[in-house]
Image (spheres, rainbow, N blue to C red):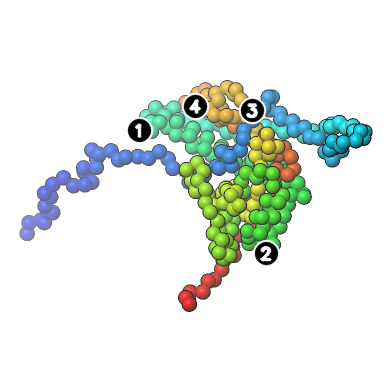
Amino acid sequence: MAKHQDSQLALGDAAARQLANSTKTVPQLSTISPRWLVHLLQWLPVEAGIYRVNQVKNPQDVLVSCSQRDESELPTTFVDYEENPREYNLNSVTTVLDVHTRVSDLYSSPHDQIKEQLRLTIETIKERQESELINNPDYGLLANVADEQRLSTLTGAPTPDDLDELITKVWKEPAFFLTHPLAIAAFGRECTRRGVPPPTVSLFGSQFLTWRGIPLIPSDKVPVADGKTKILLLRTGEKRQGVVGLFQPGLAGEQSPGLSVRFMGINRNAIASYLISLYCSLAVLTDDALAVLDDVEIGKFHDYPDTYK
């Protein structure tokens, strides 16, 4: 009996692919986020990595009077300053990237290996920067909220009443709320329950929920623990005596404000090294520029009747 052979009428896919080149994306890094906080802060250059925040001592002691028609004696006054103002030192987020020269020489088409390695490392450093701006125990937002600027939720879930109370703490030109995306979803549910859906605003080409015209900015760097998180409210800008970001200008190998990339050479194992450094910090210029809503529960949901009258 003749051996059965499958007949082939044309070139098959498996063989044809040997002559084809797939379209390749650059490496996708799932931890990259929009980092809205970094975009919304005013960034100030500092000298020698130090920023001093001078404060007025006893503002209530500065006396003035309303002019009277009689010739009463006018008050005399002066503005005193704190003698030991706080100084902020820039923090560094740093790493050394190693790339084997054989890899960069042979495998850099269609995407440059060194360029992509640098891009992904820089993105990770910038993610850490935003986390430090929020959580750093020295200069981070959460560590610099004054005691009188802290509130707790009324019932656990974030309600419009809670955010209204937060606004009373930062009523001088508040810029934005900052919280975890899960807290924004929880706030949206509470608004829906009350029949007051919050309007949206477009910033940087994206839509954000607002309350009283103030946008709610999401950041996954705001910590969540035991089903609870926090909502911050900020006033920003140096002229408004708000919250400002700090960076070191004029770095060697500067790629963007405060970020530098420097080639460190090639070792005897043919590995090229690049030093990547980002210098930054954050300062709260006055206590009433920042407030926080604590104990925000993110897991409350509501049942709604499914009947109509």
| Location of residue 260 by image quarter | top right
Q: Is residue 113 left or right of residue 225?
A: left
Please state which of the two labelled residues, at mark 4 or mark 1, is closer to the viewer. 1
Image coords of residue 301 (percent x, y): 56, 66
The x, y position of residue 30, in whole percent, is 48, 46
Q: Which mark is residue 155?
A: 2
| Amino acid type, residue under disc 1 in the picture | Pro
Residue 269 visible here: no
**Based on the displayed image, in which of its 4 quarters is residue 275 positioned?**
top right
State which tag comes first along the sequence, 4 or 1.
Answer: 1
Q: Is residue 72 visible?
A: yes
Which mark, by number, is residue 110? 1
Mark sitting earlier along the chain (4/2): 2
The furthest residue to the front: 69
Q: Nearer the viewer, residue 270 or 99?
A: 99
Residue at x 16%, y 45% (from the top left corner): 11
Residue 49, horizontal then vertical, whole percent: 68, 28
Q: Is residue 129 left or right of residue 202?
A: right
Q: Which mark is residue 272?
A: 4
Which residue is the extreme one toward the left? 1
Q: Secondary structure at mark 2?
A: loop
Q: Residues within 10 Å of mark 3 (few under 14, many from 20)?
A: some
Nearer to us in this view, 29 or 104: 29
> What numbered label is drawn on residue 293?
none
Sequence-wise first label, 3 or 2:
3
Sequence-wise first label, 3 or 4: 3
Q: Select label 2 or label 1 by which is in front.
A: 2
